[in-house]
Every structure is written in structure tokens, then in C-alpha cells.
Image (tube, rainbow, N blue to C red):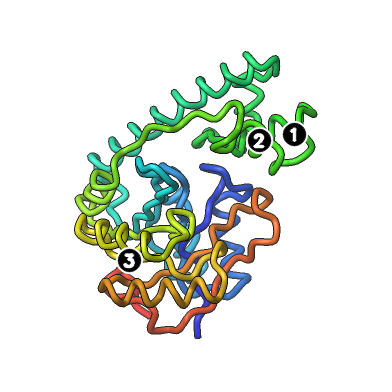
Amino acid sequence: MIRVEMHFHSTCSDGSDTPVALAALGKRRGLSVMALTDHDTMEGVPAFLASCRKLGIRAISGVEISAEFPSTLHILGYNYNVNDGDFKSALRQIQTYREERNLKMLRKLNDLGIPLTLEDVRKEAASAGVVGRPHFAYALVRRGIVHDLPSAFSEYLGREGKAYVHKKSLKPEETISAIRRAGGVAVLAHPIQTCADVNKLSEIVRWLKSLGLWGLECYSGHHSVDNTAVYRDLALANGLEITAGSDYHGRGRPGCHFGIAVPETLLPWARLGIFM
């Protein structure tokens, strides 16, 4: 067995640790393979990869993209060319959609009588990276509007919340195509969030496979042992690779363990540019 971590977030999106600190954490935890997967941005990837090289940790480029879909559908991109201009442009477009959504959510909150400003929200982001709903949640807690992060989402920011705004994004086919054109591979993240019904999920997975999906995140901080077994079978039945990641956010997801134990033969590492 080896320990890997192929799904986690830094201060460049909604995590609480810097890319460099996460590389160091991976070294302390004895991880063999890592991939930083911030939301809709590759901003922290160069520094993360450089730190991993210095520490002797095998690492590849990563990103997590929220695709346009009726339910949550997050696509992980791995081993893409960080200098690909078209991919950078696609991510900038998604970030523009995110910024538009932030302004709409802020207006909704203000209309509800909550005197939150964009500056309040940005202060919760530890860097000039992507600003999203978790930063709104932190700001609401700091202002004393709600007691904790779950309350912020259930009352205001979640899908049923008073200030929720749907974020426009790329379609799944556009997302997968953008990753592949940049030389990377596409993986469906935490499939339980896309659809808990395995039969319906199977249909979605087959459709995504037809679009070029490469893998399925079977080992996840969101999955039980039974979930993992079901998703492994689903991946194998559809000829998809099996990946593993905790979705670690630091303080944003307390209790989430960094690093997952998996068989050494889990992935065709060489095809990902990793030589074990």
C-alpha cells in the first residue's frame, strides 16, 4: 500500500493552507503522489510542484472544475500543461462567471438586510485567488450573522438558501475537452455528490465516458467504505481508472484526513507522468 492525495485545496481557492505548506504536509504524512486541485484555478500549481520537487515528492498538475449540470458535477483535471494558453483562457472564463455570481449573492444578502461588503468577503480569502461561497460563509460568521459555517450554507448560501445563486460554468463536454486539449485527463470527483442513486449515476458515468472521461474518484473523504466498493465496480465496468483524494480544505473541512491509503497498482502512474 502507498498513501496518495489527489484532491485537496489551498489558499488559492477555498483551502486554509498555502500550496507550499501543503507540499510540506504531504512530506510529513509520507505521501507518495500528490495533486493540488484548487477550484477553477491553476494559480498555486507551479509553486506546489516546485516545492514537491525539492521535497522529493512525486506530484502532477491538478484542478477541480465545477461543470454546468442540474446537480453537483465536479471534474478533476490531471497532468495538463500548465502553460497551455487555451486552458488558461477557459479557467479565466469560469472565474469571470464566479465573480458575477459573487456580486449577485452579495446583492441578495444586502437585500435581506445583511450589511456585507465584497471587501469583507475578500478579507476571508488568504490570497488573491478564487473567491467563493466558503469565504462568504466565513464573513457571515465573523459578522455574527450566523454561528457557524453549516448555518451559513443552510440559511443563506446552499442550494436552498435565501441568497443562493447558481454559478454559470462550462458544460461537461466543454470541461472535459478543455482538459484533454491541454494534454490532461479528466476524472469525475466525489460521484456521490453528483447522484446518490447508483443506477442513475451509472447512466451519467457512461455519458461522461462517451465525452472522454478518464477516471472516477472512488476513494474520497465523502465516501464510506461501501460507497468506495460500489464506485470501484462502476469504474471497472466502464473501463475508467480509479483515483483517490480526500477533498481536504484545512479549517474549512475539520476532521478530513489528508492522504489516503491505496494499492500501489491503483493507477497507471507512468501514463500520468509519475514513475514509482
| Residue 156 in the figure: left or right of residue 177 | right
* Nearer the observer, 209 or 120: 209
Callout 2 environment at 10 Å: few (<14), some (14 to 19), or many (20+)? many
Q: Which badge, 3 or 1, comes first in the chain's sequence?
A: 1
Helix, strand or loop for disc 2? helix
Whole-Å distance between the Cαs marked 2 and 3? 32 Å
Foreground residue among 55 and 36: 36
Tally the marks: 3
> Residue 249: x percent and y percent?
60, 52
Please name the amino acid that badge 3 sits on: Gly
Amino acid type at circle 2 is Ala
Q: CA distance from mark 3 to mark 1?
A: 37 Å
Secondary structure at badge 1 equals helix
User: Callout 3: few (<14), some (14-19), or many (20+) C-alpha neighbours within 10 Å?
Assistant: many
Q: Is residue 226 above or below residue 181?
A: below
Where in the figure is residue 168, as x and y percent of width and height? 38, 32
Instruction: Name the residue tied to disc 2.
Output: 137
Q: Quadrant of the C terminus?
A: bottom left
Report the residue marked by disc 1: 141
Instruction: Using residue 93 as the reference point, say whether residue 38 is left or right of it.
Output: right
- Position of residue 65 relative to residue 233, above or below, is above
Residue at the disc numbered 3: 215
Judge left or right: residue 170 versus residue 129: left
Mark 1, other Cα within 10 Å: few <14 / some 14–19 / many ≥20: some
**Separation of residues labelled 1 and 2 (CA atoms):** 6 Å
